[in-house]
Amino acid sequence: MSKTAFINGPVFIGDGNILDSGMVIIEDERITRVSEGSAAAPKDAEVIDLGGDMLLPGMIDCHVHMCHDGSNDPFTNSRDKSVADITLIAAEQARQTIMNGVTTIRDMGAPHGIDLALRNAQASGAITAPRMKVSCGSVCMTGGHGWRTGREADGPHEVRKAAREKMKAGADLLKLMATGGVMTPGVEPGSAQFTEEEMRAGIEEAHKAGRLTGTHAQGRQGILNALRAGIDSIEHGFYVEEEAVSLMLEGGVFLVPTLAAVHNIVVNGAEKGVPLYAVEKAKRVVAIHKENLMKAYRAGVKVGMGTDAGTPFNRHGQNLQELKLLVEAGFTPAEALSSATKVAAEVIGMGDELGMIEPGRLADLIVCQGNPLENIGLLSNPENISLIYQSGRKIR
């Protein structure tokens, strides 16, 4: 049995609480002891002196697309690549992601079963990558948002069948497209797509199989359709307004805002090769997105960190820039960190295993040089993350 003791540094527990100087002991893959003060480390433990650097839970990104490369136009740029090429690129992007301190991700749409292959390779130890929850691609209406990589279905019966196909393939969750989106030409982010009845059919099938559900939902009516149908998380949520907030609070539904996606499209723009249709749509929603996020958060909606990594200039391995965007929107640094730890673990259905530094949980831990509570931007740079552990195994 291997044993490691981290001493002499502040510990961010995950729920906003902080130990000014703590000792954390891990044995094999789990945390076994957390204490405050200067107690002596066990004699049989490897001792890691933090030297005042902060120990945090491994970060969790609730919304990535590991097969998109974060270029100016990921869909067009991957069109001529083979499945083998995309898989190799995705594996390298997964490695870059964990080196940013993100030890767990939820992939919300990948083609050709590549997300399944990556998930299984990581679980077997074949690749260095975040732990993965995968959707096996999305389910969308014919010609709707995401049709280029999703499974098209129309009407409750087809959506039900599509959901069953995803469960059969091994999906950890079901992703449904409730509205249009920014990155698909010819569709509008605010327009509803799947009806409430179609959404309910898919959600029922996922829940019967013990799986969680998430929905790409940007416009008002589509968000309401998803909430009334029983969804577990709203992704993006540009127009999460008063009625939606009430339903989210009533149902314990999470919001995953993915601020980085719209931000990077607007900041880089058409002059850097982002499709003009995407830039125009992103500019229309960037301000209301932040405004509604903060209204929902202040009302009590739980917000999990997600980035939509893989969309234009939204690079894998730079995931924790999302924390800075959350703080700029109105979160405190501690709240932003909790959204990427404790809350994110709950979003992905691993709230009992991840997201907190406490005995019994998996030892996913990172060490940040400096204090991210004073400068949240420290975590944006992977070079500031000196140590990374995943299930007790040292990654760096």
Image (cartoon, rainbow, N blue to C red):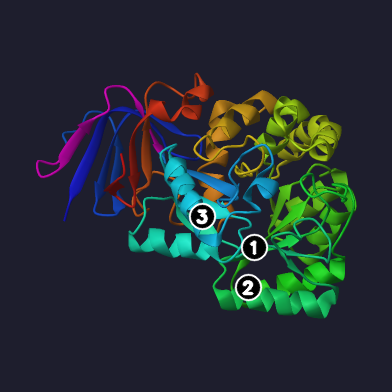
Front label number (3 vs 1)? 3
In the picture of the structure, the residue carrying the numbered disc 3 is 85
Mark 2 or mark 1, earlier in chain: 1
| Image disc number at residue 137 | 1
| In the depicted structure, whether residue 346 falls above or below residue 18 | below
Q: What element carries label 2?
A: helix
Residue 334 image position (x, y, % from top left): 54, 30
> Residue tagged by mark 2?
166
Measure the C-alpha gap from mark 2 to mark 3: 24 Å
How crowded is the residue under tag 3: few (<14 C-alpha within 10 Å), some, or many (20+)?
few
Q: Which amino acid does label 2 sit on?
A: Lys
Report the label total: 3
Q: Is residue 60 magenta?
A: no
Q: How crowded is mark 2: few (under 14 residues within 10 Å), some or many (20 or more)?
A: many
Question: The C terminus appears in which quarter of the rendering?
Answer: top left
Q: Is mark 3 on a helix, strand or loop?
A: helix
Nearer the observer, 316 or 303: 316
Indicate the amino acid at tag 1: Gly
- 10 or 150, nearer to the observer: 150
Is residue 44 shown in magenta?
yes
